[in-house]
Amino acid sequence: MHGNGGSDCTCSAPVDCSAPDASGALEDAYEYDIYRFVDGERCLIARSYIDTPSEAHFLSIDVAGESRLLKDADLLESLWLFAQAQLRREGKLQLCWLSGRDNGYEPVPADSTPLE
């Protein structure tokens, strides 16, 4: 997916699961989509679990190859707005971001309006 100003989005669908038990059954399996929104040296990463399709969580941002948690200032960037718009177009209406404060995840602020 391509956005304004050279932003791109890719999506992969990994599955994390526990080792099989004696009968071969998997105790835990988590299927999710990982979204990578890229603009130059910035890459914003989000995850959406298959069993909660209307939710997505922004996990981190890579800047020039260095990964870190998101900061409030990142929520003002055009890449952030592009990512929100893409996820909302896919039906992800409950968006959160990993801030590292309190319980870790916070709702995307209402004043963080996506570009249309």
Image (tube, rainbow, N blue to C red):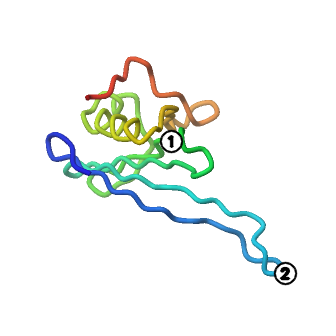
Query: In the displayed image of the protein, which residue is found farthest to the left?
Result: 5
Residue carrying label 1: 57
Rendered residue at 41%/34% (across/down):
71
Rendered residue at 17%/40% (across/down):
4
Q: Where is residue 116 in the image (x, y as percent from the top left)?
A: 26, 29
Rendered residue at 51%/39% (across/down):
98
In space, the residues marked 1 and 2 are separated at their CA atoms by: 34 Å
Q: Where is residue 47 in the image (x, y as percent from the top left)?
A: 49, 49
Q: Position of residue 111 (x, y in %)?
A: 38, 17
Residue 103 image-quadrant placement = top right
Residue 74 image-quadrant placement = top left
Residue carrying label 2: 23
**Tag 1's secondary structure?**
strand
In the rendered view, does 3 fall on the left or right side of 76? left
Which label is found at residue 46? none
In the rendered view, does 98 fall on the left or right side of 103? left
Name the residue type under label 1: His
Q: Which of marks 1 and 2 is in front?
A: 2
Q: How many marks?
A: 2
Q: Mark 1 or 2 closer to N-term?
A: 2
Q: Where is residue 31 in the image (x, y as percent from the top left)?
A: 59, 59
In the rendered view, does 50 fall on the left or right side of 45? right
Residue 84 image-quadrant placement = top left
**Tag 2's secondary structure?**
loop
